[in-house]
Amino acid sequence: MRFTKGNNHIGHYIVLILILGSGFFMTVLASPNKQLQMVAIVMTTFFYIAWGILHHLINHDLTAKIVIEYVLIGSFGLSAIFFLLKGGLGL
């Protein structure tokens, strides 16, 4: 199968979907246990950041700006989920 320039990253994105999907699945499975949910979310965030850095490293376009971006987006997602798990907004 030949890949065109637009879809040669499909394998990378399949791995990303697997990382995020398995993180969601593990979080749902750990539902009554908030601490175990946080472990699953922290691990998902770690693998998301590692995936992003590795993806750009393989494509030879890794810069400090990209690393900071993945760390900030991961931290933002982690803090938002933490806020919700701790009963944020009283919901």
Image: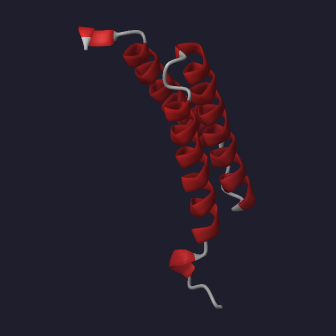
Q: Is residue 64 visible?
A: no
Give percent across and percent down for residue 74.
53, 31
Give percent across and percent down for residue 91.
25, 14
Q: Name the residue located 57 percent from the left edge and 28 percent from the top edge.
A: 41
Q: Is residue 14 left or right of residue 54?
A: left
Q: Name the residue located 57 percent from the left edge and 20 percent from the top edge.
A: 38
Residue 58: name its quadrant. Answer: bottom right
Residue 20: name its quadrant. Answer: top right
Task: Give the quarter of the figure containing the N terminus.
Answer: bottom right
Q: Name the residue located 58 percent from the left edge and 31 percent from the top edge.
A: 71
Give percent across and percent down for residue 57.
73, 53
Residue 88, placed above or below residue 61 = above
Q: Of residues 58 and 19, which is closer to you in this image?
A: 19
Give percent across and percent down for residue 18.
59, 53
Q: Name the residue located 63 percent from the left edge and 47 percent from the top edge.
A: 52
Q: Of residues 66 and 74, which is closer to you in this image?
A: 74
Task: Determine the residue located farthest toward the bottom in the rendered image.
Answer: 1
